Amino acid sequence: MLRFEPVQPGAPPATDLVAAMVAEMAVVYGPIDVPGMPSATPADFAPPHGTFLVGFDDAGAPVCGGGVKRLDDEAAEIKRMYVVPAARRRGHARELLQALEDAARDLGYSVARLDTGPRQPHAQAMYESAGYRPIGNFNSNPVASYWGEKRLD
């Protein structure tokens, strides 16, 4: 079981996890931190409307992270979910998703939205098994092929 903590989105370990995720996704899709992509900056994850959570293992090492970004008064977007390779296949992504949904609910959002690309069918399957339903392209992400939404209330 992981321990989740909100951290400063513009400082380690958040920046280390985001950099690793961006590098991994660049191999899969090409650069994702470029003009035309949906915003996912530290300011997007800052309080009072957002948060960035890091999951720490029993030894205190950061093994996963992700952010909650405000879309409007009702909806938040879950962004930058990442689990370090050495910690994968242990259910941490599902734990992280639940922690991010709880954080979005605690921030007052009643809807969570997210997206994923065509080369991540495992992510789409996890989102759908967690209750996300397909919706239209809410964020104009040019590399996404699935956009999902879940009621949090």
Image: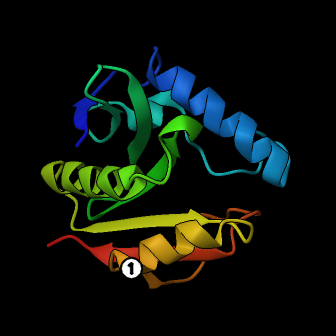
Which residue is under mark 1?
129
**What residue do we see at 40% from left, 52% from top?**
90
Q: Position of residue 74 (x, y in %)?
A: 26, 65
- Say which quadrant the C terminus sits in: bottom left
Kind of residue indicated by mark 1? Ser
Q: Is residue 73 left or right of residue 141?
A: left
Q: Is residue 130 left or right of residue 86?
A: left
- Give neighbour class at mark 1: few <14, some 14-19, many 20+ (Cα, 10 Å): few
- Residue lying at the far top of the rendered structure: 11
Question: Taking the image as drawn, is residue 78 in sight?
Answer: yes
> Taking 103 as reference, is 75 above or below it?
below
When asked about the image quadrant of residue 142, the answer is bottom right
Q: Position of residue 59 (x, y in %)?
A: 29, 20
> Taking 60 as reference, is 63 above or below it?
below
In the image shown, does 20 or 49 lie closer to the viewer? 20
Q: Is residue 121 left or right of residue 93?
A: right
**What residue do we see at 22% from left, 60% from top?**
109
**What residue do we see at 42% from left, 37% from top?**
65
